Image (spheres, helix red, strand yellow):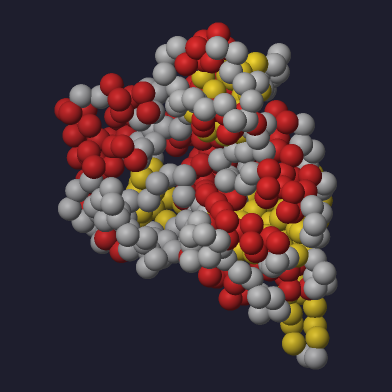
Amino acid sequence: MKVTVIDALMGTGKTSYAIQLINEAPASTKFIFVTPFLDEIDRVIEAVPTRKFKEPDVKHGEGRKLESLKKLLKDGADICTSHALFAMADEEVKELLQYENYVLIMDEVMSPISQVKLKKNDIEVMLDSNLIHIHEDGQVKWIAGEDHQSGYDTIKYYALAGNLYRSNKTTFFWNFPASIFDMFEQTFILTYMFEGQLQKYYYDYHGVQYEKKSVIQEYVVLDGQQNGRYKLVDYFQEDKSKYKDLINIYEGDLNDIGEKDFSLSMGWYKKSSPVRLKKLKDALYNYLRNLQGAKSDEILWTTFVDYNGALKSNGFSKGTVKKKKPDKSGKHCYVPFSTRATNRYKHKSVLAFCVNRFVNPSDAEFFAQRGIVIDEDMLALSDMLQWIFRSRIREGKPIEIYIPSKRMRTLLQKWLDGEM
């Protein structure tokens, strides 16, 4: 197993390198390309004319995409799929991967852990009933037998697959099976600031070894024409100074609501009265509509999903409807702050980041049980930069941005100054 993390700024050629790699690889090498968005799958398929990439289809494999994925693996096909489907990989998927020479390319990191919903005394009941055993390292083993039927079948499925761990006396976490990376000839992860992302800590937790690389573009002259080629080099931190003139961070009275360390955090939103939320809503409106005079097509803003309805106003409410259709044309104004790996908002020029990002306490506790401490500031900065670079800044064009949280604003300024 070899895991290579291509850690480079958004728009510097990570995906272009991956496409170049696929186009030039021998036919005997098979690829699985994993990306967060279904429309990005179409883009990759079109960019690789040398191969016939296939996407798992609900019309095949007994109507389930996971079954369709398994069928494609049995056929030895080149596959392009989503993070959501790849996260469902089970023991059968791992077995199928052993029979072909597959290379995995992950466009952006995925969510490698998730908390399993349990009632207050469920863990105690399962232990007392001899359904499970919990190892010293926290891994949960199902000991009641595969055929045992109970109300804990979900727990049984995760535990039998070796993907369930206890964080504390009341919390179980599902883990993406780390052993799946052993099934690939090579793995490439395309991202930026890997050190601030949960997948990095997940690798540390499971002892997955990786190396970081940067990507550069070299130009060669062929037949009198200059052609660009992408090349992996030893990791280096790019010069961010050019962005200081392109990112104009608002400084003014509208920031007063975010002066405290935990202002605009999830806890702050939960405890906020309607009056305080209206104050933030008014500040957001004043910045976007009055100070910037921005039109809907120019605006990109975010907050925690549960609170976008409390902050939306006329002129920038697109995207806040709970049951919304996929935004293939990039017309939404509200976009979740976890959004990555899409170019559909590269025309947006006026931004507002109304989030103060902290790690979920239960996630932090899960990693802490192995002495792994999450860098809160790196995590927050990584998410914010990924979101900001959905805008036209990725094409070297200037943007205006409102970041009411003093903590988040300071992190961005430190990054621009080369201090992070």
| In this view, 45 is above or below 340 | below
- Asked whether the viewer can see residue 244, the reply is no
User: Which residue is pictured at 61% across the width and 58% down the height?
Assistant: 69
Instruction: Give how far across and how far down residue 70 sits, in percent.
Output: 64, 57
Is residue 149 left or right of 353 when viewed as pictured?
A: right
The residue lying toward the viewer, choosing from 318 and 129, is 129
The residue lying toward the viewer, choosing from 103 and 131, is 131
Is residue 137 left or right of 118 when viewed as pictured?
A: right
User: Which residue is pictured at 59% across the width and 50% down the height?
Assistant: 86
User: Which residue is pictured at 75% across the width and 58% down the height?
Assistant: 103
Instruction: Give how far across and how far down residue 249 sits, in percent.
Output: 41, 45
* Circle count: 0
Is residue 203 left or right of 275 when viewed as pictured?
A: right
- Asked whether the viewer can see residue 256, the reply is yes
| In this view, 68 is above or below 134 | below
Is residue 237 left or right of 392 when viewed as pictured?
A: right
Instruction: Give how far across and how far down residue 37 sits, in percent.
Output: 49, 58
Instruction: Give how far across and how far down residue 111 sits, in percent.
Output: 56, 40
Image quadrant where one finds the C terminus: top right
The residue lying toward the viewer, choosing from 134 and 404, is 134
Q: Quarter-wise, where is residue 177 in the image?
A: top right
User: Which residue is pictured at 22% across the width and 32% down the height?
Assistant: 277
The residue lying toward the viewer, choosing from 376 and 361, is 361
